[in-house]
Image (tube, rainbow, N blue to C red):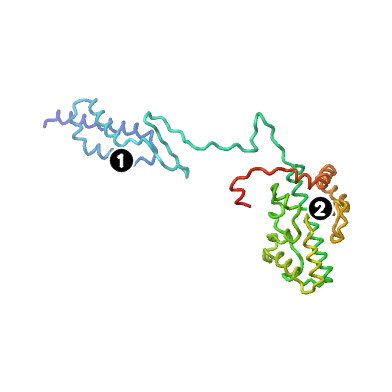
Amino acid sequence: MNNRNINTKLNKTHSLYSLTQENLSNSFEIYSEGDLNASKIVEENLNDNLDTNLELSTKENRVIKINNVYNTYKIENYNFFIQGVQIFNKKDKNNKEIKKRGRKRKRNDNESDNNKTLKTHTKFTDDNLTKKSKNIILKYALKFINEKIEEIYQGDIGEGKFKKELKIISQKNKVKSTVNIDKSFLDKNLKDIFSENISGRFNNFPKTYNKTLIESLLNEEDEEKKSYFIELFNITFSDCLDYFMDNKNNNKKLEGFIKFSSIKESLIQQEGKNYIDAFIYFLKNFKNIINNKKSRRRNKDDKIND
């Protein structure tokens, strides 16, 4: 082969190789770094078949040949991670991105609505006043029961885990509130109310501490004490509420139970007169307010959680 032919062949080789490199660079600019392995395979195949490509007569044929190779390795869909975030890309036959389908997000109660004004939820709202009412009655009912236990046993009530003293019940059991629960709570007696699990703050005591103590008091060997505790624990929440608000309740079994009038001034200092006025009205009408409420339809999840 003479020098002229050799130079011609080398020029063609250089030209083809330059074209190949240029297309490689341009083609892979649109792909992610995770696809570099595909580019290496393409380049190796091109180098192996370089002599064959030299036999193509025109630049157009060479371009067609190269494009066919790249189309073989072209990635239509990709799925990879960028800094811990997984990215998906799906396209339809017309090369348009497919939008993700799913259920529409439910409207949040706190979101503004042009046709509705947002409801403000404060300590004056009905549900909070209901919880406040239950809490204050149970607070003084617990105090009353423990004072009576100490009185009956003349101060000899034991120590530690053997002390005859009821503990605060779990807040969950006190504030759990639906229309039906609140209605039934009115006629619930002190035995059932305070036999619930005690608060988690008493982690050295079993959760059923109150229940065990009440059962022992109701089964006292001393018949006189037993009779007294049976009457005491049969007092209802409604009885306590009436006596607390001094609603013409002269129940002798509740003598010694604190009345609202004795703590009114201290509550006004803590909460303010406007709130206490609203609270007094709510307590006085508690039974009517609760009994006139209508229960809403509840879903299966709510019933299971009960």
Q: How many marks?
A: 2
Residue 66 sits above or below residue 254 on the image = above
Q: Nearer the viewer, residue 194 or 125?
A: 194
Q: Residue at x 33, y 42 (%)?
A: 37
In this rendering, position of residue 137 left or right of residue 96: right
Judged from the image, the secondary structure of the residue bearing numbered disc 1 is: helix
Label 2–label 1 contact, CB within 8 A: no
Q: Which mark is residue 25?
A: none
* Residue depicted at 76% across the width and 46% down the height: 129
Quadrant location of the N terminus in the rendered image:
top left
SS category of the residue bearing label 2 = helix
Residue 113: where, in percent of width, then height?
Answer: 65, 31
Q: CA distance from mark 2 to mark 1?
A: 84 Å
Looking at this view, is 283 or 52 the one in front? 283
Nearer mark to the viewer, of 2 and 1: 2
When the figure is inspected, residue 47 is found, relative to residue 201, above or below; the finding is: above
Say few, some or many: other residues with alpha carbon within 10 Å of mark 2 (under 14 / 14 to 19 / 20 or more). Answer: many
Relative image position of residue 302 (x, y in whole percent): 61, 48
Please state the horizontal and vertical placement of residue 217, each as a whole percent of the image: 76, 69
Name the mark on residue 40.
1
Residue 226 seen by the camera: yes
Query: What's the amino acid at mark 2?
Result: Leu
Corner quadrant of residue 146? bottom right
Which of the 4 image quadrants contains residue 7?
Answer: top left
For marks 2 and 1, the one nearer the N-term is: 1
Residue furthest to the left:
1
Task: Kindly identify the amino acid type of the residue bearing the numbered disc 1.
Answer: Lys
Q: Which residue is mark 2?
A: 241
